[in-house]
Image (cartoon, grey):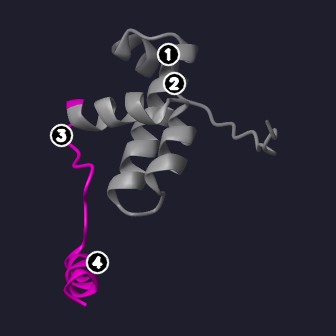
Amino acid sequence: MTKLKTTEIRFEIPEEILNSLNQDITEFIKESMLYTAMQFYKNHKLSFGKAAELAGLSKDAFLKELDKNDIDFINYSPSELENEINRFER
């Protein structure tokens, strides 16, 4: 298995936010990465596989998270849907 190069990203948040969320820093980071991955997937910024990777989840687990958060797995923009329909009609 090839180890991918990573980049560390650091930012500060007020402790009050962690307290309000009733989370420790590890939980906050994990949840933030999941929500970021889901948003990038929803907005067509990342593929399904790359979004699952960012979230640190298997594809199956990521799919379940999308469902829990009411995010469609198949999420075509109108132009993408039209391209797919045209491709299948050929």
Q: Secondary structure at mark 2?
A: helix
Q: Nearer the viewer, mark 2 or mark 3?
A: 3
Q: Is residue 18 magenta?
A: no
The x, y position of residue 72, in whole percent, is: 22, 49
Q: Mark 4 and mark 2 in contact (Cβ < 8 Å)? A: no
| Residue denoted by label 2 | 30
Tell me which residue sits at (39%, 53%) in the image. 41
Q: Earlier in the sequence, mark 1 or mark 4?
A: 1
| Residue denoted by label 4 | 80
Mark 1 neighbour class, 10 Å CA radius: few under 14, some 14 to 19, many 20 or more: few
Disc 2/disc 1 C-alpha distance (Å): 5 Å
| Residue denoted by label 3 | 70
Tell me which residue sits at (81%, 41%) in the image. 2
Mark 4 neighbour class, 10 Å CA radius: few under 14, some 14 to 19, many 20 or more: few
Q: Earlier in the sequence, mark 2 or mark 3?
A: 2
Mark 3 neighbour class, 10 Å CA radius: few under 14, some 14 to 19, many 20 or more: few
Task: Please give the range of residues in magenta.
Answer: 68-90
